[in-house]
């Protein structure tokens, strides 16, 4: 028997006027209806009021009478993140929860609350349950989280509008016991090297959270074994399979992006999803990785300098130090001293969205199967099958050319070489 919600019309809260930093957004006219004839899906319609250009997140709390229901984020889709005023719609899928089959929720009701859009989310790996803290721009610019910077990058002379948290690098707790992710809006970019005149050929319709740092040795240990430590070096010698499939570096036939979003329960991603209740944690797609790396720039490296690809008289002259890349990443000919191992994260300059080490230090796995030509279009998720997975970003032993935002490379998913690592992403519904 399919789940039934016995009350067809349910009104949520009329709350949240002026809730944060003078925010004018408000929620009204909330109606929840289970689809007829008794589909498990539940439609939740609401009206969001506010300033024309204002964007907010919408938090949903569901109850059966006075009993709060646990709804994992993966069970909700629709107008939840970066929402503008107007008539809006959310869908709840109980099949992604414990509330299905013979269960009847006779007093199902929902409350919706408009909240400001956070800039960062912090996941505390040191305790269970795993708490999550959100950092808002107003708190950041008021100095509550240490140092910050506005508009640190110009792209070919034009300012890339952003506020970044530079204080995240001054306390190693954010590289060991906690995970910090930066909120990135949906948008478009040109896949590949760009001279600043090319039209976008990739569009990402969903916002995301991107790891500020590549996953470190200690963060890996926290998730996989619960162990403590202080190692801020980027996690290396790690295969695609260990991250998403068999923790013993084995293939799990049930796990196969892009045919499904499943991960092995004992893999890093499986354990992290269980710890946090966030089912969207995963590797980035190749498109998401490049979009996050470029961060609104159209230059070879994400510092926005138009001539960044040139050293001397020859483009991509990798036999010499690249003065632009020296500031941004660890690579084979870096100055003053070339690295010989993976480095601690966060010791080079960030991009316009506050992400560190996207050029060099550690090759970063992506979800996609390797294809000779990258996928373009709307929300591309790569080839449907293959024998190799994509890696991006270059590493400490890579030539400058291989550290470009647009550079593509491949590896078999079992590869555990010393310069292989990854960065965490969370795609919003």
Image: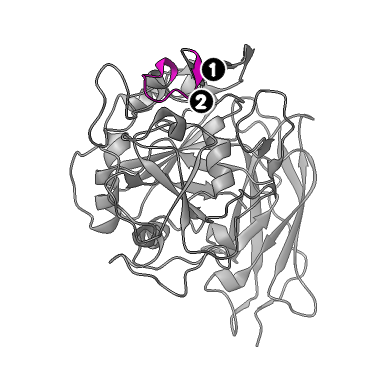
* Residue occupied by mark 2: 301
* Magenta segment, prevailing SS (helix, strand or loop): loop
Q: Residue at x 54, y 62 (%)?
A: 71
Q: Residue at x 62, y 53 (%)?
A: 429
* Residue occupied by mark 1: 153
The answer to whether 134 is drawn above or below residue 78 in the figure is: above
| Cα–Cα span, label 2 and label 1 | 12 Å
In this orientation, which residue lies closer to the viewer: 136 or 270? 270
In this orientation, which residue lies closer to the viewer: 426 or 305? 305
- Badge 2 crowding class, 10 Å Cα cut-off, few under 14, some 14 to 19, many 20 or more, is many
> Which element is circle 2 on?
loop
Q: Is residue 29 left or right of residue 71?
A: right
Which stretch is magenta? 313-324
The answer to whether 84 is drawn above or below residue 382 in the figure is: above
In this orientation, which residue lies closer to the viewer: 354 or 190? 190
Q: How many marks?
A: 2
The reply to whether the magenta stretch includes residue 97 is no
Q: Quadrant of the N terminus?
A: bottom right
> Which element is circle 1 on?
loop
- Badge 1 crowding class, 10 Å Cα cut-off, few under 14, some 14 to 19, many 20 or more, is many
Q: Residue at x 54, y 47 (%)?
A: 286
Q: Is residue 239 visible?
A: yes
Q: Quadrant of residue 274?
A: bottom left
x and y percent of residue 382 in the render? 60, 55
Colouring used for the render: one colour
x and y percent of residue 8 in the render? 77, 70
x and y percent of residue 13 in the render? 68, 50
């Amino acid at each position: 028997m399919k789940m039934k919600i016995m009350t067809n019309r349910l009104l949520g809260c009329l709350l949240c006027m002026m809730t944060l930093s003078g925010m004018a957004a408000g929620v009204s006219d909330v109606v929840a209806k289970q689809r007829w004839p008794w589909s498990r899906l539940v439609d939740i319609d609401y009206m969001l009021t506010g300033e024309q250009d204002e964007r907010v997140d919408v938090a949903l709390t569901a109850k059966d009478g006075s009993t709060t229901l646990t709804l994992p984020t993966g069970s909700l889709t629709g107008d939840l993140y970066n929402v503008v005023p107007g008539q809006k719609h959310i869908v709840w899928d109980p099949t992604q929860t414990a509330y299905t089959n013979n269960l009847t929720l006779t007093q199902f009701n929902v409350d919706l609350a408009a909240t400001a859009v956070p800039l960062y989310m912090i996941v505390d790996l040191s305790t269970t349950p795993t708490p999550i803290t959100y950092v808002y721009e107003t708190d950041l610019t008021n100095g509550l989280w240490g140092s910050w910077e506005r508009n640190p990058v110009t792209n070919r002379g034009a300012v890339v509008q952003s506020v970044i948290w530079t204080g995240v690098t001054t306390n190693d707790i954010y590289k060991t016991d906690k995970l910090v992710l930066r909120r990135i809006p949906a948008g478009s970019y040109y896949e590949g090297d760009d001279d600043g005149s090319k039209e976008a050929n990739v569009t990402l319709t969903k916002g995301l959270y991107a790891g500020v740092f590549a996953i470190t040795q200690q963060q890996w240990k926290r998730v996989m074994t619960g162990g403590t430590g202080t190692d801020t070096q980027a996690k290396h010698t790690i295969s695609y399979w260990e991250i998403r499939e068999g923790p013993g570096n084995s293939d799990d036939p049930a796990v196969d992006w892009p045919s499904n979003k499943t991960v092995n329960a004992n893999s890093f991603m499986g354990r992290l999803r269980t710890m946090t209740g966030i089912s969207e944690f995963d590797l980035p797609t190749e498109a998401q990785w490049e979009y996050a790396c470029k961060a609104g720039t159209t230059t070879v490296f994400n510092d926005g300098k138009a001539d960044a690809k040139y050293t001397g008289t020859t483009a991509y002259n990798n036999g010499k130090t690249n003065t632009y890349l020296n500031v941004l990443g660890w690579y084979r000919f870096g100055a003053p001293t070339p690295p010989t191992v993976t480095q601690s994260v966060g010791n080079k300059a960030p991009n316009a969205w506050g992400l560190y080490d996207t050029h060099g230090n550690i090759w970063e796995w992506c979800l996609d199967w390797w294809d000779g030509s990258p996928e373009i279009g709307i929300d591309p998720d790569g080839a449907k099958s293959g024998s190799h997975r994509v890696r991006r970003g270059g590493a400490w032993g890579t030539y400058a050319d291989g550290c470009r935002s647009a550079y593509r490379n491949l590896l078999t998913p079992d590869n555990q070489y010393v310069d292989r690592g990854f960065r965490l992403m969370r795609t919003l519904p």
